[in-house]
Amino acid sequence: MSYPKRTAALASAAALAGSAVLLAAPAARADVVDVNYRCQTPIGVKTAVSPIDIKGVRSGGGYKITMSWQKGVSSSPVELGEGAMNPSATIVLGGADSGTMTVTGPANQAAIPANTPIKVNDLSGTYTPKKAGKVTFTAGVLTIKALGTTTTCSPTNSPGASLRLDVTAAGGGSSGSAPSGTDVGGQLPRTGPDDSVIALGTLGGTVLLAGTAGALWLTRRQTARH
């Protein structure tokens, strides 16, 4: 095989290898998790189970976190008119961060009949990471205020995380750990002969995976040597 053809083939292999590395490290993973709630209401204790979904998207220097309930929780012995019920909740942070964040949402847009499970609207808030890393988000305490009363619903089954998010701190801070598939120097592991190392060469720590453009760069580099 001629040198230009061999160089192009190696560059294509490098592109495929780089794509595999990227696919192997997703930025976020969300799971719908069943949460067993114990609700302390003005008329006693009630229990309910609701699947919880938490999603996160980049927003400015932080992330917009949205928490969703797929089933109703608690209930009221009297009808709750439009706008009578105001929910909020905490989300427990884990992994590269700790503590809690608060999510809030609008009051009910429609009346909630008496003795009917209360469907909580989606709640959201902004999470600003202090440093880069993998952060988990787990359902915490749900608080419902209605008609001058407060109902507090706490998870009792130690639910797992509903969201695992690979975050970046403001200013592009780093967690200090190398991405999967790279060594500490930021270069792909050398697992083949010298030609493979050249094809997977880095420029300023960035792998050149530009297909034809990468092949041209390698060809010009070889020509310059002669």
Image (cartoon, grey):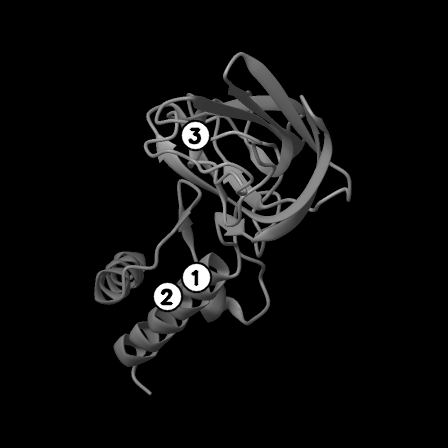
**Image quadrant assignment for residue 185:** top right
What's the mark number on residue 98? none
User: Which residue is found at the position 52% from the left and 24% from the top?
Assistant: 88
Give above or below for 98 relative to 22.
above
Q: Position of residue 72 (x, y in %)?
A: 53, 44
- Structural crowding at the residue carrying mark 3, measured as other residues with C-alpha within 10 Å and reported as few (<14), some (14–19) or many (≥20): many
Compared across the picture, whether 173 is left or right of 19 comes to right
User: Which residue is found at the position 71% from the left and 37% from the top?
Assistant: 46
Give above or below for 56 relative to 41.
below
Quadrant location, the C terminus: bottom left
Give the alpha-carbon distance from disc 2 to disc 1, as whole Å: 5 Å
Q: Nearer the viewer, residue 30 or 90?
A: 90
Which amino acid does the dot numbered 1 rest on?
Gly
Which amino acid does the dot numbered 2 rest on?
Ala
**Image quadrant assignment for residue 16:** bottom left
Q: Position of residue 119 (x, y in %)?
A: 48, 40
Give the alpha-carbon distance from disc 3 to disc 2, as whole Å: 38 Å
Sequence-wise first label, 3 or 2 = 2
Q: Nearer the viewer, residue 211 or 74?
A: 74
Instruction: Note whether residue 169 is visible.
Output: yes
User: Which residue is found at the position 66% from the left and 24% from the top?
Assistant: 152
- Asked if disc 2 and disc 1 are in contact, CB closer than 8 Å, the reply is yes
What's the mark number on residue 124? 3
User: Where is mark 2, residue-wise?
Assistant: 15
User: Where is mark 1, residue-wise?
Assistant: 18
